[in-house]
Structures are given as C-alpha cells and as structure tokens.
Image (spheres, grey):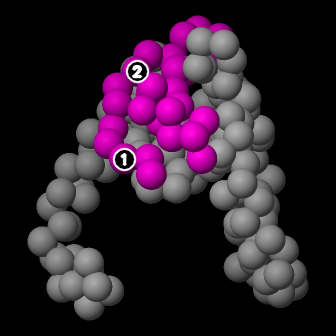
Amino acid sequence: MFRGWYEHAMDNKGRVSIPSKFRDFLSDKYSESLIVTNFDRCLVCYPVEEWETLERKASALPQLKKEVKAFQRFFISGAVECSLDAQGRILVPPFLRDFADLGKDVVLVGMLKKIEIWSKARWKDTFAQSQKKFEEFADVLAELGI
C-alpha cells in the first residue's frame, strides 16, 4: 500500500520524482505507469491496474445521470498516463499542474491504492483541516469498523 507523505521538488519541465517506497510498491505489485487526473484541489495518481478497475465501475454507471456525466467530464476526461522515467520521475502535463496549482514545492501523499500530489501550501492547509476534523469523525470511523 501507498502510505506516508514526502516533500519533493518539481523541476521546471514538470517532472516530479516518485518516492522510492512508492516506486518499490509500484514495481512489486503493478506496472510502472500511473494514471494522473484532477481531484479535490490536488492530483490523484492510480496504478494502471487500479485505474482500469475504476473505469469498469464508471462505465457501468447510468450514463444519462447528471452526476455521472459531471464525474466523467471532470475526473475521467483529465486522465493522462504517465510512465516513470529511468530516474523514477513522471512528467505532469501543464493543464494538470495548473489545476492543482503545482509549483516547485510539492507533496506526494500515499492514500492506500493511490497517490495524491499536492502543492506544499495546499497540503499544509488541507492536513491542518483534516487534523481538526479527525476527532469529530472518530465516531463515524468506529461505526465503519476502523
């Protein structure tokens, strides 16, 4: 599983190094390619095999529902396959960098079966908000069996 968070620098070409622990997990369990797309103020990266599972589920949804169309137009349409280069980096396309407001300082966050890429400033804010809400959500998590 992808876990933990790592601060990295994105170069001026838009390349970011995938942390070695993430690369090790990727190469042990999956192919060495990620599908990167828009998400909640950040980017989300799925191993191709996990992405294909998500695509199968999305294609089985009722295609005329407005929520499904909105999901596909936002989430699916932004998806780009990014292969790791010899140095373990991916090249993030400019439109995705712009969406997530990515500059030089980024944070890669392990989210079990996926990785999120955040601008460092947005990550600090989001993490602080999550930390404040954590106690509030403890009861819900307990009900879910965590």
Q: Nearer the viewer, residue 60 or 102?
A: 60
Segment tinted magenta in the rendering? 1-29
Residue 75 image point, x, y percent: 70, 58
**SS type, badge 1:** loop
| Residue at 26% across, 49% down | 127
Do the residues under discs 2 and 1 have CB atoms within 8 angstroms? no
Could you say which is closer to the camera, residue 67 or residue 27?
27
Residue appearing at x 21%, y 84% in the figure: 142
Q: Which mark is residue 8?
A: 2
Please state, as top left, top right, bottom left or bottom right, where the C terminus lies in the image: bottom left
Please state the horizontal and vertical placement of residue 78, each as a whole percent of the image: 75, 48
* Alpha carbon separation for disc pair 2 and 1: 15 Å
**Where on the picture, by quarter, is residue 30?**
top right
Residue 58 belongs to magenta span: no
Q: Amino acid at mark 2?
A: His
Q: Nearer the viewer, residue 103 or 32?
A: 32
Asked whether 22 falls inside the magenta stretch, the response is: yes
Q: Is residue 115 visible?
A: yes
Residue type indicated by callout 1: Arg
Q: Secondary structure at mark 2?
A: strand
* Residue at mark 1: 3
Within 10 Å of disc 1 (Cα), the crowding (few <14, some 14-19, many 20+) is some
Q: Looking at the image, which residue is at 72% across and 66% down?
A: 53
Residue appearing at x 72%, y 48% in the figure: 48
In the depicted structure, whether residue 139 falls above or below residue 15 = below
